[in-house]
Each structure stands twice: as structure tokens, then as C-alpha cells.
Image (cartoon, helix red, strand yellow):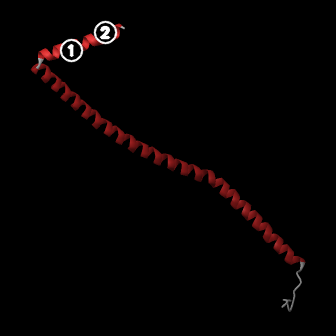
Amino acid sequence: MDYTPTNPTPLSPSDYSGVSQAASDLRSHTADDMTDFAATQPQTVKAAAVEKAQNFRSYAGEKAASIKQEAGVKLQQGKEKAKELHITAEDYVRENPTKAVLSAVGVGVIIGLILRR
């Protein structure tokens, strides 16, 4: 089936000018929208970058504080362990003074021989 209009209306030159005006308005409106969009994009990108930087800074600060706290705990544990070893060594030397002196002399002789070569 072919479609043929029953009462075709020819377009007048004034109809063409209306279409031309509408197309021109659409082009200028779109150009204005694009200009506005392009003007706001750097601000939007900058705001997003600033937000990301602030988030990263706070995350890094939290992580650094956590690591600092853990390091402080480990340092304290190390100090306690060193004190325990010192006390144990002192007790051993007091209980076995001859063994301790002979061991120290033996270690000194071995180190002297190694350094002499």
C-alpha cells in the first residue's frame, strides 16, 4: 500500500524561514550549552581532585599513626626483652663466675686469631 497524503499542503517560503530560525536557535543554544559545560569542567575536575587528595591525605595520616603506634609497641617490647636478657646474663655470671670468665677469654682469643689473619 502506498501512502499518499490526501490533502498535501505546499510549504511557503515563510515556513522555511521558521525552520531556519529554529535550526539557528538550536545551534546557538547548543554552542552556549557546550561553552558553559566546557567552562565548568575544569572546576569540576579540580573539585574532584581536591576531594581525592584530601581523602588520600586523611588515609595516609591514619595509616602513619597506626604504623607509629605499632612501632612504639614493638620498641617497648624490644626494650623489655633486652632488659630480660641483661638480667639473665647477669644472673648466669653471678652463679658461674669461672665459666663466664673462661668463656670470655676463649671468645676473645678466637676473635683475636680471626682478626690477626
The label number, if any, that marks residue 104 in the structure image:
1
- As drawn, 13 above or below 35: below
66 vs 103, nearest the viewer? 103
Within-10-Å neighbours for mark 2: few <14, some 14–19, many 20+: few
- As drawn, 30 above or below 99: below
Quadrant showing the C terminus? top left
Residue 103, given in percent of the width and then of the height, sits at 19, 16
Q: Residue at x 12, y 16 (%)?
A: 97
Relative side of 36 to 80, left or right: right
Outermost residue on the left side: it is: 95
Q: Residue at x 42, y 46 (%)?
A: 59
The label number, if any, that marks residue 113 in the structure image:
2
- Tell me the CA gap for discs 1 and 2: 14 Å
In the rendered structure, which amino acid carries the disc numbered 2?
Leu
Q: Residue at x 34, y 10 (%)?
A: 115
Relative side of 89 to 68, left or right: left
Relative side of 112 to 102, left or right: right
Circle 2 — which element? helix
Residue 43, given in percent of the width and then of the height, sits at 60, 51
Circle 1 — which element? helix
Residue 35, given in percent of the width and then of the height, sits at 70, 57
